Amino acid sequence: MSVVVRYHVWCLSWEDEESYGSDVVGYDILEHDYETQEKDTIYVPSFSLGSAGDAAEAYADYAHDNRDGYEETWPLVFRVRCPDGSVQDFEVDREYVAEFSATPAKPARERVA
């Protein structure tokens, strides 16, 4: 059985207290049971949760999608309580990745009016 890595993360930029934050937990993608997930816990594949910084990014992604993160001015500062009890602060910035989609173009003579 694998050891569960659990970080607790909250946003200092929103003046949150630790009690408002969420746990970020690593899981084994081959053995994870989605039906037994804890409420208000963010599950991240263990291969992508190697550090407190990864936990801060996972919580930032969650906050962005579920807590008006789209309206905020990034970067935001997140505090992480590590499994050993130590605390670290991280400034997390939002990056944009362009997505492109192609559709068939009309022949040239149809485009000219």
Image (cartoon, helix red, strand yellow):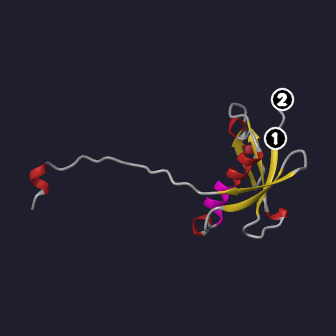
User: Callout 2: 10 Å neighbours few (<14), some, many (20+)?
Assistant: few
Q: Is residue 15 left or right of residue 94?
A: right
The label shown at residue 1 is 2
The label shown at residue 57 is none
- Magenta highlight: main SS: helix
The residue located at (68%, 50%) in the rendering is: 58
Magenta-colored stretch includes residue 65: yes
Q: How far apart are marks 1 and 2 (CA)?
A: 13 Å
User: In the figure, residue 92 lies in which quadrant?
Assistant: bottom right
The residue located at (51%, 54%) in the rendering is: 96
The residue located at (64%, 54%) in the rendering is: 61
**Circle 2: residue type:** Met
**Depicted 4 relative to depicted 38: above or below:** above
**Depicted 55 relative to depicted 32: above or below:** below
Q: Where is residue 35 in the image (x, y as percent from the top left)?
A: 72, 44
Q: What element carries label 2?
A: loop
Q: Is residue 26 left or right of residue 73?
A: right
**Circle 1: residue type:** Val
